[in-house]
Amino acid sequence: MVSEVGRVAARYASRLAGNTWTERVRFAALMVGLLAFRSAVADWNDVPTGSMRPTILEGDRIFVNKLAYDLRVPFTRERIACWAEPSRGDIVVFYSPEDGKRLVKRIVGVPGDTVSLDGGRLVVNGTVARYGLVAGPHRDILDGEVRVSETIWGNTHAITLMPRVPAPRWFGPTVVPEGRYFLMGDNRDNSADSRFFGFVPRSAIAGKAPAVVASCDRRNWFLPRLDRFLVRLV
């Protein structure tokens, strides 16, 4: 009797262990599939700094479209197919050539462009950007910030200037090499970008950031900013 009970218990334990192993395999396959999807199709990126203010704020979670330009082998930078190239004005997520960290900036120069800053005024291929004040009020504006619109080569978007802060307001002119891009933050006087770490290789651009998915206010107990949910980025 005791031996029979032992055999039944052993069979049950074996079946349970088999089920547990099956569930583990299923879970592992699910996780690999999810990571592959995030690697090659779509992802999100939490933004911890204000280098893209006012377009992107600290605490924003942005959507990253990894199929905007090409299709890559998951977990690599190897391209399977390419149907578009990054354009001036695109907001992209990329890997810094300096330390490999994932960053988000705006493309201001594509291969072959001549880019310079003249006292903070952007110049691309001899075309000087036009600027105008952006009407307020702005709840998120910080002390010392000035918000203006920048228009160049058909692209208009808001940028932040900080006149009180020492910043690299003169740069170039420099020609963007083939297969490279010149990226800058919209917070022009408080952004580590191509002025510091140089041109960004095409292979380092992970995808395009077209929208904010959700947002929380890090300066106010991480409360949600409902007005920034599902906001399109321009």
Image (tube, rainbow, N blue to C red):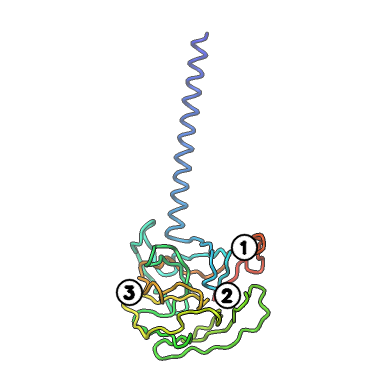
**Residue located 44% across and 73% down the image:** 193
Q: Which of the two labelled residues, at mark 2 and mark 3, occupies the earlier sequence position?
A: 2
Amino acid under label 2? Pro
**Residue located 46% across and 83% down the image:** 169
Give residue 73's quadrant in the image: bottom left
Residue labelled with disc 2: 54
Contact between marks 1 and 3 (CB within 8 A): the answer is no
Secondary structure of the residue carrying numbered label 1: loop
Secondary structure of the residue carrying numbered label 2: loop
Q: Is residue 196 left or right of residue 228?
A: left
Residue labelled with disc 1: 218
Q: Residues within 10 Å of mark 3 (few under 14, many from 20)?
A: few
Question: Of all residues shown, which one is farthest toward the left?
Answer: 178
Measured in 3D between alpha carbons, the distance from the residue under mark 2 to the one under mark 3, in whole angstroms, is 29 Å
Measured in 3D between alpha carbons, the distance from the residue under mark 1 to the one under mark 2, in whole angstroms, is 15 Å
Choose mark 1 or mark 2, whichever is in front. 1
**Residue located 52% across and 9% down the image:** 2
